[in-house]
Image: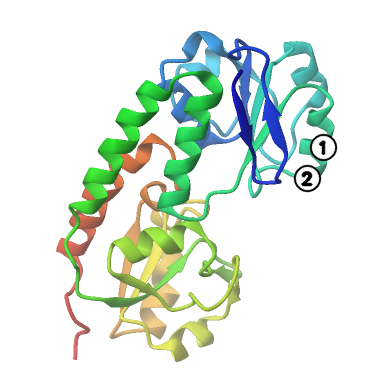
C-alpha cells in the first residue's frame, strides 16, 4: 500500500496505486509526464504548461491559487499533488475532504530529489524515479567550483522582489557559484533600487518569470542606470525554480550562464 508523509506531517496512505491523479503544481505535473503517467492524470491547473498537449487533453481545475473545488470533486481523484507555497492552505484543507492530498515543500535540490522519490513511491514508479534522480545527481555533481559572484536575483518589479535563503532558487544559485546577497533573509523580500545599489553586488539576475523582465528593455533600464559597474543579466527563470525533471537541464544552464558572465567584478 503506497504510503508517505507530506510537508504538513500528514500521513498519505493509498489503498492501491492511484488511477486518477490531479496535479496542482506545474513542476510536479511535468514530473508525472516524465514518469509515463499520462493515462492516470485527469486534472491540472492552467499554469501547468508542460507537457503542452495535456492542456487540451486534461481537465483544467483552475489556477494554483484558485482551485475549482467542484471540478476537482467531479473528477473523483484518488490522489492530489499540491505544494505548500503554490497552493493555498484553504484549498488544500477543502481538498483533504475529497481525496488524499500529498503536499510538498521544496527548498533545495536535495529536497526536490526527495520529492521525486516520494511521488515515485505513491505512484509505484520508483524504478523510473530512481533513474531520473541518478541522472540529476550525476549532472549536478559534475559542476565545477565556480568563482563566487555576489548576486541579487530579482523575481518582480514595482516593487522589486528578490529571494531569501529559504527558497529553492537560493539553493540553485549556490550550485552556480552565485552568492545570494539576500541569503540572510527569508521568503521574498521587497527591495528599492537604492537598497540594491547600496549592496554593491557583482551581478543582478533578472528572471523571465514570474515577472517577464525579458520582454522589454525598459524593465531593466533603471537597474543598468543605477548600477553602471554591475552586470545586469536576463536569465531563464525555469532552471532556477522548476524542481521536477527540468533539473536535468539546470546544470548545463548554469555552466552556460557562468561562461558568459564576468569571472570577477569589472573595475
Total count of labels: 2
The residue under the point 82% across, 37% down is 93
Q: Which mark is residue 234?
A: none
Look at the numbered discs 2 and 1 and tell me whether their residues touch, using CB distance below 8 Å: yes
Quadrant for the N terminus in the image: top right
Q: Is residue 189 left or right of residue 155?
A: right
Mark 2 Cα within 10 Å, few/some/many (few <14, many 20+)? few
Q: Is residue 68 left or right of residue 158?
A: right
Is residue 245 shown above or below 172?
A: above
Answer whether residue 214 is visible to the viewer in this image: yes
The residue under the point 36% across, 63% down is 173
In what element is the residue under mark 2?
helix
Q: In x, y percent, where is residue 234?
A: 34, 60
The residue under the point 58% across, 35% down is 25
Q: Nearer the viewer, residue 96 or 206?
A: 96
Label 2, on which residue? Answer: 89
Q: Is residue 175 left or right of residue 6?
A: left
In what element is the residue under mark 1?
helix
Is residue 252 shown above or below 127?
A: below
Answer whether residue 243 is visible to the viewer in this image: no
Residue, far front: 1
Label 1, on which residue? Answer: 93
Q: In x, y percent, where is residue 75?
A: 72, 12
Q: Quadrant of residue 33?
A: top left
Mark 1 Cα within 10 Å, few/some/many (few <14, many 20+)? few
Amino acid at each position: 500500500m503506497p504510503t508517505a508523509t507530506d510537508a504538513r506531517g500528514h500521513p498519505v496512505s493509498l489503498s492501491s496505486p492511484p488511477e486518477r491523479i490531479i496535479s496542482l503544481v506545474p513542476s510536479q505535473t511535468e514530473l508525472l509526464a516524465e514518469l509515463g503517467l499520462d493515462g492516470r492524470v485527469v486534472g491540472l491547473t492552467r499554469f501547468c504548461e508542460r507537457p503542452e498537449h495535456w492542456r487540451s487533453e486534461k481537465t483544467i481545475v483552475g489556477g494554483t491559487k484558485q482551485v475549482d473545488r467542484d471540478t476537482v470533486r467531479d473528477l473523483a481523484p484518488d490522489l492530489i499533488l499540491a505544494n505548500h507555497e503554490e497552493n493555498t492552505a484553504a484549498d488544500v484543507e477543502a481538498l483533504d475532504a475529497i481525496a488524499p492530498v500529498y503536499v510538498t515543500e521544496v527548498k533545495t535540490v536535495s529536497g526536490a530529489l526527495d520529492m521525486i522519490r516520494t511521488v515515485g513511491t505513491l505512484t509505484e514508479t520508483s524504478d523510473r524515479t530512481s533513474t531520473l534522480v541518478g541522472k540529476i545527481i550525476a549532472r549536478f555533481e559534475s559542476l565545477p567550483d565556480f568563482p563566487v559572484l555576489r548576486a541579487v536575483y530579482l523575481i518582480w518589479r514595482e516593487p522589486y522582489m528578490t529571494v531569501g535563503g529559504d527558497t529553492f532558487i537560493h539553493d540553485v544559485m549556490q550550485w552556480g557559484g552565485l552568492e545570494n546577497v539576500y541569503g540572510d533573509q527569508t521568503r521574498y523580500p521587497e527591495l528599492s533600487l537604492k537598497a540594491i545599489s547600496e549592496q554593491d553586488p557583482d551581478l543582478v539576475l533578472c528572471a523571465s518569470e514570474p515577472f517577464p523582465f525579458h520582454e522589454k528593455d525598459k524593465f531593466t533600464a533603471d537597474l543598468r542606470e543605477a548600477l553602471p559597474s554591475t552586470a545586469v543579466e536576463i536569465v531563464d527563470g525555469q532552471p532556477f525554480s522548476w524542481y521536477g525533471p527540468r533539473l536535468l537541464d539546470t546544470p548545463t544552464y548554469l555552466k552556460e550562464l557562468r561562461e558568459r558572465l564576468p569571472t570577477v567584478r569589472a573595475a
